[in-house]
Amino acid sequence: MELGDLPAETVEKLFELGCFLIVNNLPIGSQFSIDGSSSITGPLFQGIKLIPPGFHVISIVPAKSGTTRMDDDEDELPSSSSQIGHLIKTGFLRFFKEKEVVVRNYDPETESLRSIDDDHQDTMISIDYMKTLDPKLAPYPLSSYIRWKSLTNLIKPVLVQKVFVSDKFGDFTLDSTMGNQSNVFSPAPPPGSVSGSKLLRNRMIWGKPRPETEESKTGVKTDADLKQHFTNWPFVDLKRSWPKDCVGPELTRWSRDKSWLLNQIIINQLDNDTNQILGLIQLSFLTFVQVHSIQSFESYQLYINLITKSEPGQLIKFSSKYINLLSNLVGVLRDQYDFLDQDFFQRMEDFQIENWFFDCLNLFRRILNQISREDEGGDMRKCLKDHRVGSDWQALQEVCRKFDWNVRPLKIEERDQSDSEEEVELTSSDIDDEDDNKPVVVEL
């Protein structure tokens, strides 16, 4: 669906309510991406028009110095490019408002988009000027907007503000190598563990200890600290996942089962709202894929591992809301895996990344099967069906075929059958799954 395929009335409405991003001084031949659609800029490119209001992620890779020509003189606006490798990128994140016109200059020193004047907000731009600028603005890729909405439906301004911290104009910026300042918006260490106040402030980042600043000594940010750019992803210590005063078997139990830790984080750090951790999963995934942020990927792994290493029965004992978390996560993962290009993992330098993505699906499948198997009354199984978990999982299976993955089916539907043979088959299949990772005793 392109702009020319839309009715004139719809185009007019988009022009009235849509947003505009005007980019000045971006070098010709730069890579410019918005919401997963990547292009190489031509000599006339000066921004994007008809951006739907809401959250959007823009990333740029500036052309090398001296690159001034295009391969084709007719490529005046961006030319589509789906085979762009994993480069160091700068990300520009923003919640666009209706009819908003955002003007930013490319700063070659920081390789990022900056406000034209740091002393005042963006000024109003006349409609007449916008019409003259229109030929230089590429249309927003509307064909992928519905998918983008599903990828970002749980990302809220307050969550993004906590993780990235906006400037006074509402812009959030990050780059591929930005580290994490864990002491901001970090879950408190479990009771009885080492205090995190000094420990977290001096965590290792990219293999080097962070130098102790005035802030780390006094707890107050200095001007120099404010100029440093770090992400503020919540830090979760999976190696300390037990309640205070745990000993013996109880300590062993909570060391393996992360459900207590997950419950504490949801209650104390995420306003007792399970949708917030799903929002973090969406945000970390998109900034990893689009901006190539290493820190975002590490955070994404952390939150997925926290959920998939939690005992589902214990989670549901804490609160029935966790059945909604597990059910909704299926749809989140389906949309995310669908968003990835077919050759995404082939372009990765580390094959273990693909292994991790595949393994997390297997772990999650076992969790959902375990809920169905242990649900004697059938209430939880009914809840899974009401959330369309079965159909979402089938869609996820189909999506993963492009990676040549064989994702095994769920066993939710079979449990509803009264035939005992099917129940025996279910139990046997799940036991086989669990036995895959058990040690084997060999008689010598």
Image: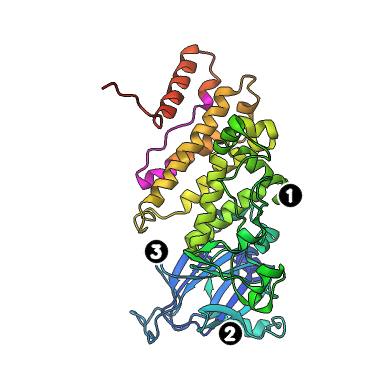
The residue to which callout 1 is attached is 271
Q: What is the secondary structure assignment of the residue under circle 2?
A: helix
Classed neighbour count for the residue bearing mark 2: other residues with Cα under 10 Å, few (<14), some (14–19), many (≥20)? few
Q: Which residues are magenta?
A: 398-413
Which circle's residue, 2 or 3, is located before the other in the chain? 3
Which circle's residue, 3 or 1, is located before the other in the chain? 3
Where on the picture, by quarter, is residue 251?
A: top right
Q: Is residue 127 inside the magenta stretch?
A: no
411 and 398: which is toward the camera: 411
The residue to which callout 3 is attached is 82
- Labels 3 & 1 near each other (Cβ < 8 A): no
Return the x and y of residue 146 as percentages of the image width and height: 56, 55
- Labels 2 & 1 near each other (Cβ < 8 A): no
Q: Residue at x 47, y 64 (%)?
A: 207
Does 318 appear above or below 54?
Answer: above
In the image, taking residue 55 as reference, residue 299 lies left or right, namely left
Color style of the picture:
rainbow
Return the x and y of residue 214 as percentages of the image width and height: 67, 73
Depth-wise, is mark 2 or mark 3 nearer the camera? 3
95 and 7: which is toward the camera: 95
